[in-house]
Each structure stands twice: as C-alpha cells, then as structure tokens.
Image (tube, rainbow, N blue to C red):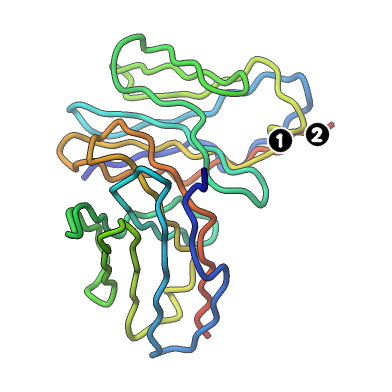
Amino acid sequence: DAGVTQSPTHLIKTRGQQVTLRCSPKSGHDTVSWYQQALGQGPQFIFQYYEEEERQRGNFPDRFSGHQFPNYSSELNVNALLLGDSALYLCASSLSLVSYNEQFFGPGTRLTVL
Amino acid sequence: AQSVSQHNHHVILSEAASLELGCNYSYGGTVNLFWYVQYPGQHLQLLLKYFSGDPLVKGIKGFEAEFIKSKFSFNLRKPSVQWSDTAEYFCAGTFKAAGNKLTFGGGTRVLVKP
C-alpha cells in the first residue's frame, strides 16, 4: 500500500516565478492538507481540501492556491515566488475531516527560491 | 489563537537515559494532541495521539505521553532511549474551534549518543 507521495522531490525557482507541487494521498484517504516547513521550524498549515473544495485555510496570502481532483490527489500552486517561500512543503492525507484521525505525511518537496 | 509550544529545541543524552520532552498548548476547549517523529531522511510519522479517555497514552517504540488538562500539557516520555531514537520530535494539536488542521510546535531535536 503506497503511502502519501509527492512530486517533485526538489525544485529550484527564481523570484517572481510560479510553481506547482503535486500530492497523491494514501489509498482510501479523501482529505489532503498542505503544510510549509521552514528550516528549523515546525510545519505551518497552509490549507486543506475535501470533496474538491478548500475547507480551511491558514495565514497564507492568496499567492498560495490549490486544487483537489476527483481521485483525491491535490496540487499546491504558488505564484510570484519570494525568497521567503523557500521551504519544505509537506502534504498530509487523512480520512474525512474528523479531528482525531491521524494525518499521514509525504516526504515533502524542497523548494528553493533564488 | 491556539498554539503549541515545545520547551526544548535540542536535547543530547546517552543511550539508556530517560527522555522527557515538554509540550504545552493554549486553548480552553476540546483538543486532540499528537506526537510526531521525523527520523533522519524520513517522513513525519505518528508516535501516539490523545483524543479522549485514559490521559496516559502509549505509542510505538516504547514511547508514552500524559495529557494533563489542568497544566495544558502533553509531555512525551521514554524510560530508556536507544541510539535509533535520534530524531526530531514534534508535538501537534487540533482544536475544536479550528477544525482538524494540525498546529505544530517548533520541534525538539534529540541526539542520542551511543
């Protein structure tokens, strides 16, 4: 059973560019959450998708957007990249929106903005 | 706003020593609490979680945590660590007012010397 997968593993972009990160949830999961983890810090919640709709959003600007597809996979898009967007982006999947259900994390995409 | 804090950023100890990592949260309502671990080069994975019932929770690899509501704490313990416990440990919570998004502490890096 494949766990959460993310692509690409690493990405280097320059300021002002746009980036798309992808996530496939664990089999049987229908909810995908995205987190940003800056170096030396804990993950910060970006947003969450369930039934192809954004259900919750953290304190991130509109430059961060996402999408969930009918097969539950998800994309995270970041426009007008800033140096401060350099971080590890984590995708987590879970079953439904139940708050005590475990969220399973992927390996992350390391984004470097130059 | 709800938050999670971890007291120690770095802990260094010898094999067979006991480990206790502190975690506090700020929220007066219903909480679900989690400890995640990230071994070098690996994904975040769940060690244990608390959502109701017995406040002493046992997890994988000999870890346990105690939920003390009056102290807003959820400290992680292991009586005797091994070199393989070297990792970064994250405390996280979901809070009823905030749905099921995970709020993470800043993490504690644990180094176990053989």
Q: Which residue is disc 2 drawn over?
A: B113
Q: Residue shown at 57%/21% (left/top)? A: B63
- B77 to the left or right of A18: right
Whole-percent x and y of residue B16?
76, 19
Whole-percent x and y of residue A78?
34, 77
Label 1, residues with CA under 10 Å away: few <14, some 14-19, many ≥20: few
- Locate the N terminus of chain B by quadrant: top left
- Nearest the viewer among A55 and B92 is A55
Q: Residue shown at 36%/39% (left/top)? A: B4
Q: Which residue is disc 1 drawn over?
A: B12
Q: Are marks 2 and 1 in contact (CB under 8 Å)?
A: yes
Which chain letter goes with mark 2? B
First in sequence, mark 2 or 1: give its number: 1
- A7 to the left or right of A45: right
- A105 to the left or right of A101: right
- Locate the C terminus of chain B by quadrant: top right
